[in-house]
Image (spheres, helix red, strand yellow):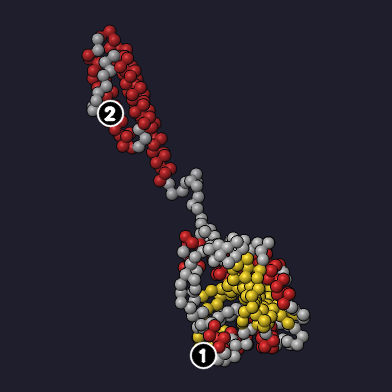
Amino acid sequence: MAREDASTLENLDTLRKKIFSDLESATDSAALESFRIKYLGKKGALRALLKGLKNIPAERRKEYGARANQLRAETEQAFSSRTRQKKARGDQQSSPFDPSLPGYPFPHGSIHPLTKIRNEIRDIFISMGFDVAYGPDVESDFYNFAALNFPPHHPARDMQDTFLVSPEVVLRTHTSPVQIRIMEEQQPPIRCIMPGRVYRHEEISSRSYCIFHQVEGLYVDRDVSFADLKGTLLWFARRFFDEKTHIKIRPSFFPFTEPSVEIDIECFLCKGAGCSVCKQSGWLEILGAGMVHPNVLASGGIDSEHYTGFAFGMGIERIALLKYTIDDIRLFFENDIRFLRQF
Ligand SMILES: [Zn+2]
């Protein structure tokens, strides 16, 4: 250890500065201990200073001795005050409760993208006076097929690959069975949407999954016409996608509606100009719809001589994939937090 040469009063002042600067920079226990050994220990600089008194010329010895003693007293006092401070800080840090620390973040969940889309669709139809109804996921063959104008062995049953619980009980392949349940309970006017989960025995890939979600809609009253269907769905499309969006109606086939149509929405990404999402066509297939088949009204106990109605259905996954430009439907079901946090 280097000894300070403080054989003169000037050197004493230099040593004093050095001592206080060293003490200032000693911030942890190890540094404080080094400081103590270096200056206050048995072989420390201050002890050496007093031992060196005999070498000081006699006429300066008294003053020098007094200054050296004063320096030692000051150093001891400063050192012990510094040690107390350090200990107080240490005690504070080791306390389990420190009210000055910022709180732990409490992560909020986010709304699942499918729930978000479903809620948006639901709110638009509620604003048009529709009710919301739900039905069971496990259905009888009657509600899922027969009542919806799929007679046994009808080739249309091949359109949907069905999970059978037993020969007469299925996991519903669409939300349309809820239409029958509503009509059984209620006489027209009926204005209702029916969101829910549906099941099909499909190979799982980025484009298809064995579970998905639909929103079904039904309006039955006197004089409900195809124009009402068109107006309602155009209004919906403009509220949901873009207020200037156009729709295109193409003939199609469903057993439970006649006539049946598919409704394309002008691509909301390219505004109809053509892009990779709409495969350059400018249109997106979003909805199936049609006028409720008289046989279906009859299955629900509605007099098809006096009442007409329209029905429509759309896949929530399909809309969410398009709206959020997601390229893999499986992401909706894997619940990967990195995916879900983005919504
Ligand atoms: Zn497009």
Q: CA distance from mark 1 to mark 2?
A: 93 Å
Q: Position of residue 181 (x, y in %)?
A: 65, 83
Which residue is rendered at x = 61% and y = 81% of the image? 253
Question: Upstream in the sequence, badge 1 or badge 2?
Answer: 2
Residue that appears at 35% across and 29% down: 23
Q: Identify the residue at image location x=51%, y=62%.
A: 340
Which percent across, then down, holds residue 92?
43, 43
Front-most of residues 24 and 283:
283
Q: Are marks 1 and 2 in contact (CB under 8 Å)?
A: no
Q: Which residue is mark 1?
A: 167
Q: Which mark is residue 38?
A: 2
Amino acid identity at mark 1? Pro
Judge from the rendering whether residue 326 lies leftward or rightward of residue 126; answer left or right.
Answer: left
Label 1 SS: loop
Where residue 73 appears, as percent x and y from the top left, is 34, 23
Q: Quadrant of residue 310?
A: bottom right
Quadrant of the rendering where the N terminus is positioned: top left
- The amino acid type, in three-letter code, at marker 2 is Lys
Residue at 69 percent across and 86 percent down: it is 294
Residue 16 seen anywhere in this rendered image of the structure:
yes
Q: Is residue 183 left or right of residue 329?
A: right
Vertical side of 77 occupied by 219: above or below? below
